[in-house]
Image (spheres, rainbow, N blue to C red):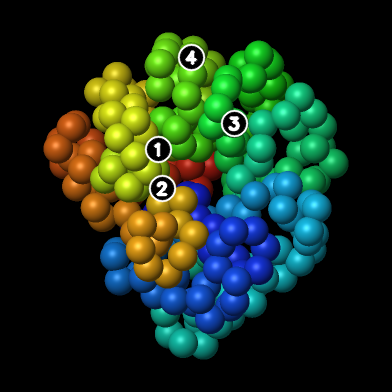
Amino acid sequence: MLDLHCHILPGVDDGPPTMEQAIEMAVAAFRDGTCTIVAAPHSRDVNERSSIACVRTLAERLNEELRARSIPLDVLLGMENHLALDTPEQVDAGTCLPIEGTRCILIELPFEFYPYHTRDTLRSLRNRGLTPVVVHPERNLAIQREPQLLASLVQDGVVSQITAGSLTGDMGLDAQHSAEKLLRLGLAHVIASDGHAPSGTRAPQLSRGVAAAAAVVGDEAARRMVDSTPRAMLESRVK
């Protein structure tokens, strides 16, 4: 499995505070069947409390530690980029990052509302040759009430990533019901962990979420969401 959204870098945001806990997260993910993780620290935390150079170094160090311990899991650097009017300009400036080696970029909407400029901003990213990946849309209150908001983005070429913990109920019933609805409507393309810790409800484990998705859309469709679809994105076949 491939996990496109995980807060595994140590000491950057609300993920693990130490390298040892980051390694524990990697071990937990590998044991659950994950072979590749995209480290996705919050863009605001990186730019306000750290730096792009620092997170690049942390990703390199984490990969070195995993190789030294013979843990066959690859960590790619990405970023959970908060949607703002100037997100495209932040990309131009190099302070918002796509997923390493790809044209796919993780975008987080606010939980409480749907910004009026969402569609225009994402179109601006598309015009730059990027594929926006909207993370955990099932947790946005407006999309919970009106899934057509997400449908209009998908029609524009946006990819939708739901969280494994939403499907299992760990993020609350509203997020679970919304995730299931998005699955039934064909508005969910990828399942990711959004992992933050080595254990508990925020562990980087996908299998339970895949099983929950399979109960809604079937085994084959659920498996694609953690295998062939994210693999194609990392190979830059999603345009």
Q: Earlier in the sequence, mark 2 or mark 4?
A: 4
* Residue drawn at x 56%, y 62% as measured from the top left: 15
Contact between labelled residues 1 and 2, with CB atoms less than 8 Å apart:
yes
Label of residue 125 in the image: none
* Residue drawn at x 80%, y 37% as measured from the top left: 90
Q: In this figure, which residue is indicated by the disc labeled 2? A: 192
Q: Badge 3: how crowded within 10 Å, few (<14), some, or many (20+)?
A: some
Label of residue 162 in the image: 1
Q: Earlier in the sequence, mark 1 or mark 4?
A: 4
Image quadrant holding the N terminus, namely bottom left
Q: Marks 1 and 4, Cα distance to the nearest angstrom?
A: 15 Å
Q: Marks 4 and 3, Cα distance to the nearest angstrom?
A: 14 Å
Q: Earlier in the sequence, mark 2 or mark 1?
A: 1
Q: Secondary structure at mark 2?
A: strand
Would you place residue 17 above or below residue 36 in this image? below
Q: In this figure, which residue is indicated by the disc labeled 4? A: 149
Contact between labelled residues 4 and 1, with CB atoms less than 8 Å apart:
no
